[in-house]
Image (spheres, rainbow, N blue to C red):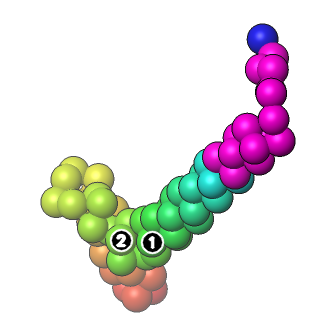
């Protein structure tokens, strides 16, 4: 449903509101991109794994690989 405007002041007011909403959305996207970049940093990825089984498995696999590599 389209809005009917009675004056240019109403049009300009709505345009200003839309412009501000667009700027807010753009800043939110920038913030989300920054958050994603921080999460994907190697130290952060390891901290996400925490002390869970996956981290223990990866460490034991890496140690096993290194031991097999240097025994030869």
Mark 1 lies on residue: 38
Point 57% across, 62% down: residue: 27
- Tell me residue 3's x, y (percent): 77, 20
Taking the spot 29% from the left edge, 58% from the top edge, the residue there is 49
Q: Where is residue 29 in the image (x, y as percent from the top left)?
A: 59, 57
Tags 2 and 1 touching, CB below 8 Å? yes
- Within-10-Å neighbours for mark 1: few <14, some 14–19, many 20+: few
Any mark on residue 61, and which?
Answer: none
Q: Quadrant of residue 50?
A: bottom left
Residue 37 image offset from top left, x and y in percent: 52, 69
Q: Nearer the viewer, residue 50 or 30?
A: 30
Q: Where is residue 46 in the image (x, y as percent from the top left)?
A: 33, 68
Q: Earlier in the sequence, mark 2 or mark 1?
A: 1
Q: How crowded is mark 2: few (under 14 residues within 10 Å), some or many (20 or more)?
A: few
- On-image quarter of the C terminus: bottom left
Find the magenta span and give its range.
2-18
For label 1, the SS is helix
Where 50 falls versus 62 (above or below)? above
**Residue placed under numbered mark 2 in the picture:** 44
Residue closer to the observer: 47 or 69: 47
- Helix, strand or loop at mark 2: helix
């Amino acid at each position: 449903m389209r809005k009917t405007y009675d004056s240019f002041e109403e049009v300009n007011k709505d345009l200003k509101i839309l412009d501000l909403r667009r700027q807010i959305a753009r800043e939110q996207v920038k913030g989300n991109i920054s958050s994603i970049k921080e999460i994907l940093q190697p130290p952060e990825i390891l901290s996400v794994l925490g002390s869970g089984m996956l981290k223990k498995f990866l460490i034991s696999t890496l140690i096993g690989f290194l031991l097999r590599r240097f025994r030869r």
